[in-house]
Image: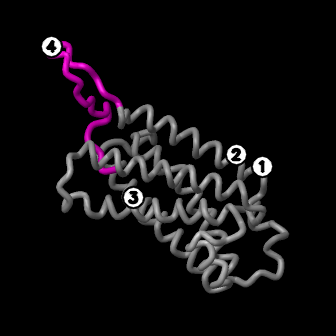
Amino acid sequence: MLLAAMSPFLAWRQPVYILAGFAGILAMALLLVQPLLASGGLPGLAGLRGRRVHRWVGAGLVLALVVHVGGLWITSPPDVVDALTFTSPTPFSAWGVVAMWAAFGAALLAVLRRRIRVRPMTWRRAHTTLAVVVVVGSIVHALLIEGTMETVSKAALCLLVLAVTGKALVDLRIWARATSASSGRRVERPSGHGRRDG
C-alpha cells in the first residue's frame, strides 16, 4: 500500500480513481488471507473461529471489488462497459472481469449454502473451484497492468497468493479420493481439518 501510494501514476488522477485502485490492491491482499483461513493456517484462527473470519474477509473482498469496479465506472463508464462485455482491447480487463464474477459466485454459494440441497463435498468443490478462478484471474489481471502497484512488490504478492492457495488446496484435499480397503469401492476422503464453510 505504501509503495503504491508513492506511485507516479497517481499524479493528476481523480480521488475516485485512486480509491478504486487501492480497493483493487486491498482485494488482492485479502486473497492472501482467505486460503490461510480456509485451511486453518493462521495461528489462533482454526476451526469455527477461522471459518467465521473467512466469511467476514470474503464479504470484505466482495465489497472491495464493488468499490474497485464502481470507482472505475464513475471515472470511465465506456471502459467498464467494454470490460464487462469482453470487448476491451486490453487483455487484463477480461481476466479481471472473470475473477470478479467468480468472486461473486463464490460469495453467493456461501450465502446460499444452507438453502441449496447439495452434498457438503459438492458445495466445497464448487466453492473452491470458483476461488481458484478468482486467484488465477486476479493474479493475471494484476500482472498485466502497469499501474499503481510497484512492480516487484506486486509480483511478490502474486507469488505469495499463488503459493498459499496451492498449499491450502493440498491441505484441504478437496478433490482427494480414497479406495475402501474392505470393499474396493472409491470413497471421498474428507479434509483433515473437519467440515468447513469455505
Q: Which residue is mark 4?
A: 182
The quarter in which the N terminus is drawn is bottom right
Q: Quadrant of residue 77?
A: bottom right
| Nearer to us: label 1 or label 4 | 4
Q: Does the residue at mark 3 contact the one at mark 1 (Cβ under 8 Å)?
A: no
N-terminal-most mark, 2 or 3: 3
Where disc 3 sits, the SS reads helix
Q: Nearer the viewer, residue 149 or 81?
A: 81
With 174 as the anchor, is 62 left or right in this view? right
Q: Which residue is mark 3?
A: 106
Residue at 75% over, 66% down:
148
With 125 as the anchor, is 139 left or right in this view? right
- Amino acid under label 3? Ala
N-terminal-most mark, 1 or 4: 1
Where disc 2 sits, the SS reads helix
Single out the residue that lies furthest toward the left.
183
Residue 107 in percent (x, y) is at 38, 62
Q: Which residue is mark 2?
A: 156
Residue at 33% over, 55% down:
52
| Nearer to us: label 2 or label 3 | 3
- Amino acid under label 2? Ala
Q: Does the residue at mark 2 contact the one at mark 4 (Cβ under 8 Å)?
A: no
Q: Which residue is mark 1?
A: 152
N-terminal-most mark, 3 or 1: 3
Q: Does the residue at mark 1 contact the one at mark 2 (Cβ under 8 Å)?
A: yes
N-terminal-most mark, 3 or 4: 3
| Nearer to us: label 3 or label 4 | 4
